[in-house]
Image (cartoon, rainbow, N blue to C red):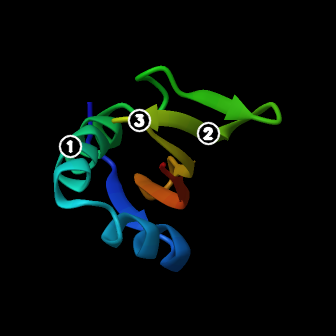
Amino acid sequence: MSRYALQYAPPADEARRSMPPALRASFDVGMRDLSAAPYGLGSAPVKDDPDRREATISDVVVRYYVSTAVLTVTVVRVIYF
């Protein structure tokens, strides 16, 4: 299985960078796993679109799009408490 490239939209990247260091480290490991299997890891489609997905990674909710044409996962929203 090919690993997808992982990119963050500016608001998602800003939220990721503002995480406490321990959370961000754990989150980054989980996101590397997600980039290998973007349709797995307990993710679910959003509004019946299989490429628009939501998952919880290290207690962080992420919403992302999968592009199979260019093997890219684009994270558009990151929510943590």
Element assignment for label 3: loop
Name the quarter where the N terminus is drawn: top left
Residue named by callout 2: 53
> Residue at image x 33%, y 35%?
58
Q: Is residue 1 above or below residue 16?
A: above
Residue named by callout 3: 59
Residue type beneath disc 3: Asp
Nearest to N terminus: mark 3 or mark 2: 2
- Closer to viewer: mark 2 or mark 1: 1
Q: Is residue 1 above or below residue 9?
A: above
Numbered circle sitting on residue 26: 1
Element assignment for label 1: helix
33 displayed left or right of 40: left
Q: How many marks?
A: 3
In the rendered image, which quarter is residue 59 located in? top left
Distance between mark 3 and mark 1 Cα atoms: 10 Å
